[in-house]
Amino acid sequence: MLSAALLVLAMSPGVYDPIFHDGYDPASDCPAGRQDVAVIAYGLNDTGHGIDVTEWANIWGRASAFDPPIPWPGVNGAWPIILDFGGSTYIAAHFTVPGDAPPSWYGWITHTEYGYGTDVTGAISPYCGDFSPAAQACLTATISGQVIVPWRTSSGNFCPLVPGTDYYLNLKLSGPLTRPGCSTTLDSCVVSLPNNTNVD
């Protein structure tokens, strides 16, 4: 699979990572370089400035920038477009899996072809800024149109999430900023990341 090849490339020695080039220290709270706020559009004339992207609910817990956020897994079909995803930063969106979450829940974030920007690497981990999670299923390096870290509240092929546990969805740009929707001058890209959940 192409995504498996990209994952191997992303983890290969010698591939320079502008954020974590000195490695990841799990003893710290969050490594330097975390993007705390962003400009997010949810549709025409529906843009929020200075949105706190340190919490999942603020990104995927609303269908409009004007809606009050709801906790993870958020709003199915929410379609946030991050207009200023930093090229040398990462987003670590914290969430808690409810203690009473049934084992039938699953979902993912999609990296759409609309407002593409560049490639995105995502990981779900108990640690902020961790792009080397213990379970290989909890890490993906995606290109346009692919899903980012499919998860489920039971064991299986997706990233397994344990009810009552805190996690971070860690995201960083992993492709060049020379693609449409990116700016080398602003060191940022437009990235469209809709939420897809099945929690019925």
Image (cartoon, rainbow, N blue to C red):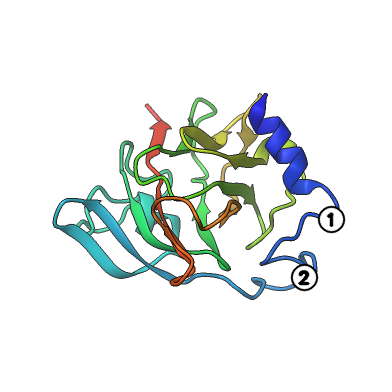
Between 37 and 10, the one nearer to me in the picture: 10
Q: Quadrant of residue 75?
A: top left
The picture places residue 43, in percent across and down from the top left corner, at 20, 49
Inter-mark Cα distance, 2 to 1? 24 Å
Q: The residue tagged with tag 2: helix, strand or loop?
A: loop
First reached walking from the N terminus: tag 2 or tag 1: 1
Query: For residue 27, which numbered disc appears in the image?
Result: 2
Query: For residue 2, which numbered disc appears in the image?
Result: none
Q: Is residue 139 left or right of residue 45?
A: right
Q: Residue at x 66, y 41 (%)?
A: 138
Residue type, mark 1 in image = Gly
Q: Kindly tell me whether residue 44 is visible in this rendering.
A: yes
Q: Residue at x 22, y 61 (%)?
A: 47
The picture places residue 166, in percent across and down from the top left corner, at 58, 55
Query: For residue 14, which numbered disc appears in the image?
Result: 1
Residue type, mark 2 in image = Ala
Q: Quadrant of the N terminus?
A: top right
